Amino acid sequence: MINKANNYGKFILLWAGELISQIGGGLSSFGLGVYVFRQTGRASDMALITLFGFLPSLLLSAPAGVLADRYDRRLLMMIGDGCSGAGVVFILLCMINGGATLIQICIGVFISSIFASLLEPSYRATITDLLTKEEFSKASGLVSLAGSAKYLFSPIIAGFLLSISDVKLLLLIDICTFFLTVLSTAVVRRNINNKKTEIRDGFSVRLKEGWRAVYERKGVFMLIMVTSVITLFMGVFQVLAAPAILSFSDSNTMGITETVCACGMLVSGMILGIWGIKRQFIKILSISLALAGVFMVGFSAFESIAWMCVFGFLFFAALPFANNCLDYLARTNIPDEFQGRAWGLIGFLSQLGYLAAYAVSGLAADFLGALSGRGVGRGSAMIIGISGICLIVIAVSIPMIKRIRDLDR
């Protein structure tokens, strides 16, 4: 049993390692996206890299959670962080030897993502091991900040570095961060004992119980489908905002724009942390999603960095309100004894929207750009605008679904 007294300092060390890791990973993601777009000029190629980086984490999230319950969580974190650097090293070596092809980049990103998938469940579980319940709330804000670091800090840093060097510098910095994060985890592991958990049920049994807990509550299941749609449109924005900006600007400007837009999440998160939402969750969910759709349309309407910053900021500012409502409605309608296994399934289902966005949005932007004769940049903007209109329609429809409406009681 881990003694949780005076463990907050160990959490801070672990959190600092995660923060550095997220920033380093964000530098590589940004740099590789710019590199590929400059080489090919296709949004679909940028989306392909994102897809290969996301797919292993989606498919392996549940098995990684089981491993985190059965084995040394800190050791899994060290393996995940350390070995994920192999993919980045592979890409860097390819570039040094004359330039990495799209296939080589996808292979490297895929390898990195496989090992990185070990990290997240072990990291979350380790926080539970280290902290008392009274410290969870204080730690949650820092955890959220670290998770958002690749959107808040990495783009502006990467954009500046690309203005004075090239993508190889970003990859090298990312590789260096792996050593720091593994070291911080090793220090924490040395100072605490491993918590051994006896698992009586098999993985398939727990998965089936989680499925029943979600599917038999039809309102909750419909709500998860709504969440998947939200991640679909977030994925469209995430993939296509970059080619929409790069088509008429440079990487430094894109980095600043992405950071400004992502700050919307930070501002809303602070507001929710202070005041929260007390009632009318369905109404607030509908309004926030409808506004997010409006802001997507606004972002797509102007080939102007200033207006893109304004509407991008507002789009990301609306999302935490929707996520807060979705989280509350799901938590309060699933029995406590099924929460853990149900949330593993909810996490998988809700992120299927990202998978669809990464697979299709780039191809759609390339096709529409060629069809209209306005290029991939405006093609990307048009897909973002169409997605925004669809999101508005879905948002307005939510209060009309009785099963979902009944969840807000």
Image (spheres, rainbow, N blue to C red):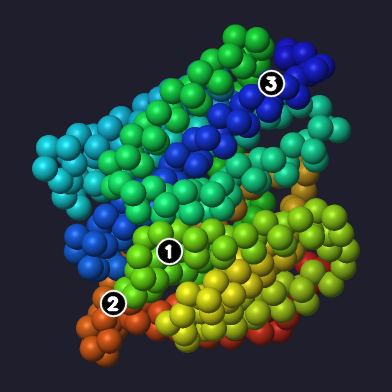
Q: Answer with mark 1 or mark 2, whichever residue precedes in sequence.
A: 1
Q: Place residue 173 in its image quadrant.
A: top left
The alpha-carbon separation of the residues under discs 2 and 3 comes to 47 Å
Quadrant, the C terminus:
bottom right
Q: Answer with mark 2 or mark 3, whichever residue precedes in sequence.
A: 3
Q: Dots 3 and 1: beta carbons under 8 Å?
A: no
Amino acid type of the residue tagged 1 in the rendering:
Met
Q: Dots 2 and 3: beta carbons under 8 Å?
A: no
Q: Please tell me whether mark 3 or mark 1 is closer to you in this view.
A: 1
**Is 242 positioned to the left or the right of 222 in the image?**
left
Residue occupying image coordinates x 56% and y 21%: 184
Q: Which mark is drawn over residue 254?
A: 1
Between 382 and 76, the one lying in front of the other is: 382
Between 70 and 266, the one lying in front of the other is: 266
Quadrant, the N terminus:
top right
Residue occupying image coordinates x 24% and y 43%: 107
Q: Is residue 100 above or below residue 385?
A: above
Whole-percent x and y of residue 77?
Answer: 50, 25
Q: Residues within 10 Å of mark 1 (few under 14, many from 20)?
A: many
Amino acid type of the residue tagged 3 in the rendering:
Lys
The residue that disc 3 covers is: 10
The alpha-carbon separation of the residues under discs 3 and 1 comes to 36 Å
The residue that disc 2 covers is: 376
